[in-house]
Amino acid sequence: MPTTMPPTIPPRVVDHEETRATSRTSWRPPAQTLRGALAGAEAAIGSWLVIAVIAIAAYIATAAAPELGSAGWIEAASAGSAIWLLGHGGALAFDGAAITLVPVGVTVIAVGGVAASMRRVRPSSWWPVGAAVLAYTALALGFAVLAGTPGSWRGVLGAPVVAAIGCLVAMRGRLPADLAGPLRRLPESVRAGIGAGARGAAVMLALGAALVIAALALGFSHVMDLHRALVPDGVSSVIIVLAQILLFPTLALWGVGFLTGPGFAVGQGTSFSPTGIEPGPLPVVPVLGALPEPDSPAGSAGFILVIGVLVGALAGLWLRRRHPLSLAHTAIAVGVGALTAALMVGALVALSSGSVGPGRMAEVGPDAVAVAVAVAWQLALGLAITALLLHPEARVLAGKAREKVAALRDN
């Protein structure tokens, strides 16, 4: 009887590595993304706490005031949130009036917080930076909900800008390759001009701060008289001083407006500039006691405009020593430097201008466009003197021109 063999089934080889690979298809965020998000959240909460603590302390110091009514801790935290968002470009709206003047000190605290947090992350790509900006903006949205004022939502739009600037400050000198590469491909004249302009703008800001400190020293007695007129107790005095410290960067930008010529206003119809002082009724803020009087020499100090030219000259010396370019490329760098300084200073001055109340107080601070134009021409002139007129090629051209003039005279 014939026998039948069972069917043979070829063996199937199972690739275990392939099986494991297909089972791990879940997406994972790139390295440092979570750390970047935590850094952004830490910076937002930290800077918010600084302002919220001051607001809550102010509530404690004035809790017995009948004007507060039934205001409590939540309202104090809401006020702190609104001020935090004001530092990010928000606004405070009440009774038909609005406060749009940015307390630049709040902005500086926020940028510094982001920079400090991101410096610990040491981002090697844009993923942690994007995560930090998103986390910071998400918390700003939550603070806007807590603030509950219509104008505060504008601060949510400014939050990613503040966070991005803080990240750039943290990565200064070690940008990710996907951005460092394109920057290195910029012409050297452009990079040199940006460096010179940034240094010139930084010096102008430092001089503005120095001017405010000098004004406070000269008018200290008047400032203290206004401080005592508020009759503050110990806690209130601390709060008033802290609030004015937050205003110091704003006042420094007003100082830049004064040094460059356009000056600034503290109410409609007022003007504080080196070509004339036109004061008016001022809010009872002690630091404003340092403003110059109508008969002050500060009102006839037009010569002060030479300071901007000197700053440009210093930037020009740096440009010549660090970037010995040809005359044509140096001229490009001079133009780029003046434009960079004007844009940087103008953008910051725009933050220090706005409204602090109804009526005449709707106009406070310098004219950003006028200050930017003044910075541009003053630094351009100074840069041209030291970077162009003293350039070796310029001296050769000047010598040839003198020879041609002498030849024409002989003929």
Image: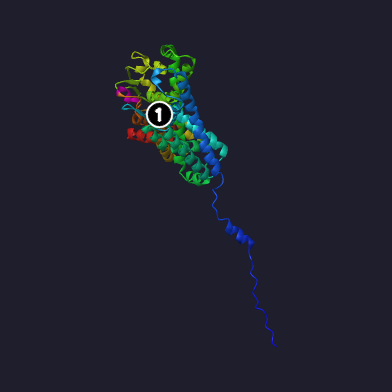
Left-right relation of 248 to 36: left
Instruction: Answer whether residue 171 is magenta in the image.
Output: no
On screen, 309 above or below 280?
Answer: below
> Which quadrant is the C terminus positioned in?
top left
On screen, 109 above or below 22?
Answer: above
Q: Main secondary structure of the magenta part?
A: helix
Left-right relation of 302 to 393: left
Give the quadrant of residue 374: top left
Image colouring: rainbow
Numbered disc total: 1
Residue 199 is situated, as x and y percent measured from the top left of the image, at 47, 32
Regarding residue 156, the answer to whether it shows in the image is yes
Regarding residue 398, the answer to whether it shows in the image is no
On screen, 219 above or below 13?
Answer: above
What residue sits 47% from the left and 37% below the top?
Answer: 139
Residue 287 is situated, as x and y percent measured from the top left of the image, at 42, 18
Residue 239 is situated, as x and y percent measured from the top left of the image, at 47, 20
Using the image as rendered, state which of residue 288 and residue 59 is in the foreground: 59
Q: How many residues crowd mark 1 within 10 Å: few (<14), some (14–19), many (20+)?
A: many
Residue type (three-letter) at the residue carrying disc 1? Val
**Magenta region: which residues?**
359-364
Residue 244 is situated, as x and y percent measured from the top left of the image, at 44, 21
Q: Which residue is mark 1?
A: 102
> Which quadrant is the N terminus positioned in?
bottom right
